[in-house]
Image: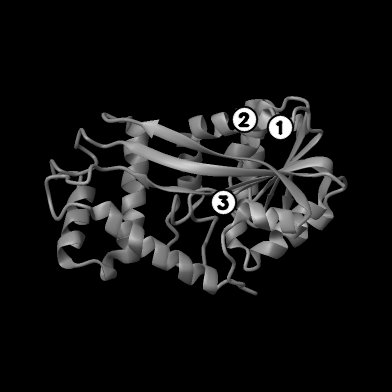
């Protein structure tokens, strides 16, 4: 289970996701989105001021886990993920950043693996990992059950699809990214339906947290705005993201959109994302928080 970079943030190749193979892309994306995460954690710090134990549920390669350790210097952080190779990256990152003495990992599938925690959790962070559980209502209930009294559950779910390109890029039909978004929405629905024990659920996160006995304490959206002309790191991320979309949805696109994507990905083409000056990253992620009061 890895966070962040899903089809509305990350592009999975198919419904049987190989998170370990995606490790580099997940890490690059999370590092690029660090300004957004830092603002979200600063906001969260006003709600849960001095947590003793923080769990990053669906931590991926640990970029956000380490940001949690830095944002809450008095806390122990446990990165939880089903992919051990991603947790290896998380441990190495914690060592590199000097937080390894209060950083641990736990390998296993959510939410059941949380039963292996030794202590109740003061802050449970789940960044775009919940929607990979077939039964999201049961997942939230399991998250809530692991919280200490006064502990906070923070779900990063929803927001807006990322944008990299203007509506009209001067080649092909205008609106390419909107058409890709529509294909991703259909893919996401199929992914959800294909999960074990999948249950259709309205994505009213505050209502689902209330049903688990938690009191809603806030919802806020955070924006990443990397305007044109963007950085080489952002350019590389955009190229990798569009290449994944081309791989996944190429056969579902009409010939014109396929040709446009191919041109965007061709480093020799002056209109490609490798060379064009109008490239940017604009994305919005939403965080919902709730507290256990009893």
Whichever of labels 2 and 3 marks the residue nearer the N terminus, that label is 2
Q: Which mark is residue 128?
A: 3
Q: Residue at x 19, y 37 (%)?
A: 276
Does residue 211 sit above or below 226 in this rendering? below
Q: Is residue 281 left or right of residue 144?
A: left
Q: Distance from label 2 to label 1 (Cα)? A: 7 Å
Q: Is residue 252 left or right of residue 211?
A: left
Q: Residue at x 65, y 38 (%)?
A: 65
Q: Distance from label 2 to label 3 (Cα)? A: 18 Å
Dot 1: element: loop
Q: Residue at x 78, y 26 (%)?
A: 74
Q: Are marks 2 and 3 in contact (CB under 8 Å)?
A: no
Q: Are marks 1 and 3 in contact (CB under 8 Å)?
A: no
Does residue 239 sit above or below 1 in this rendering? above
Q: Is residue 110 visible?
A: no
Dot 2: element: helix
**Residue holding disc 2:** 43
Q: Is residue 243 left or right of residue 14?
A: left
Q: Distance from label 1 to label 3 (Cα)? A: 20 Å
Locate the N terminus and report the quarter of the image it occupies: bottom right
**Residue holding disc 1:** 47
Q: Are marks 2 and 1 in contact (CB under 8 Å)?
A: yes
Which mark's residue is nearer the viewer, 1 or 3? 1
Q: Position of residue 262 (x, y in %)?
A: 20, 55
Q: Is residue 238 visible?
A: yes
């Amino acid at each position: 289970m890895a966070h962040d970079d899903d089809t509305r943030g990350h592009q999975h190749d198919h419904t049987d996701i190989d998170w370990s193979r995606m490790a580099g892309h997940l890490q690059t994306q999370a590092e690029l989105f660090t300004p957004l995460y830092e603002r979200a954690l600063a906001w969260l710090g006003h709600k849960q001021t001095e947590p003793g134990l923080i769990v990053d549920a669906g931590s991926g390669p640990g970029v956000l886990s380490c940001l949690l350790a830095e944002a809450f210097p008095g806390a122990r952080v446990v990165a939880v993920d089903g992919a051990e190779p991603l947790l290896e990256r998380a441990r190495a990152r914690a060592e590199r950043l000097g937080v390894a003495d209060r950083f641990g990992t736990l390998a296993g599938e959510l939410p059941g693996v949380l039963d292996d925690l030794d202590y109740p959790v003061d802050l449970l962070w789940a960044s775009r990992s919940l929607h990979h559980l077939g039964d999201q209502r049961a997942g939230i209930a399991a998250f809530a059950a692991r919280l200490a009294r006064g502990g906070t559950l923070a779900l990063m779910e929803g927001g807006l699809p990322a944008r990299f390109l203007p509506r009209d890029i001067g080649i092909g039909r205008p609106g390419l990214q909107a058409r890709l978004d529509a294909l991703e929405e259909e893919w996401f629905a199929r992914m959800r339906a294909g999960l074990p024990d999948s249950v259709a659920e309205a994505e009213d996160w505050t209502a689902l947290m209330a049903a688990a006995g938690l009191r809603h304490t806030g919802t806020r959206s955070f924006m990443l705005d990397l305007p044109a002309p963007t950085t080489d790191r952002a350019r590389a991320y955009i190229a990798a993201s569009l290449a994944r979309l081309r791989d996944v949805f190429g056969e579902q696109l009409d010939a014109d959109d396929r040709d446009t994507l191919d041109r965007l990905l061709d480093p020799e083409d002056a209109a490609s994302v490798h060379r064009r000056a109008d490239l940017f990253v604009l994305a919005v992620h939403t965080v919902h928080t709730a507290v256990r009061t009893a």
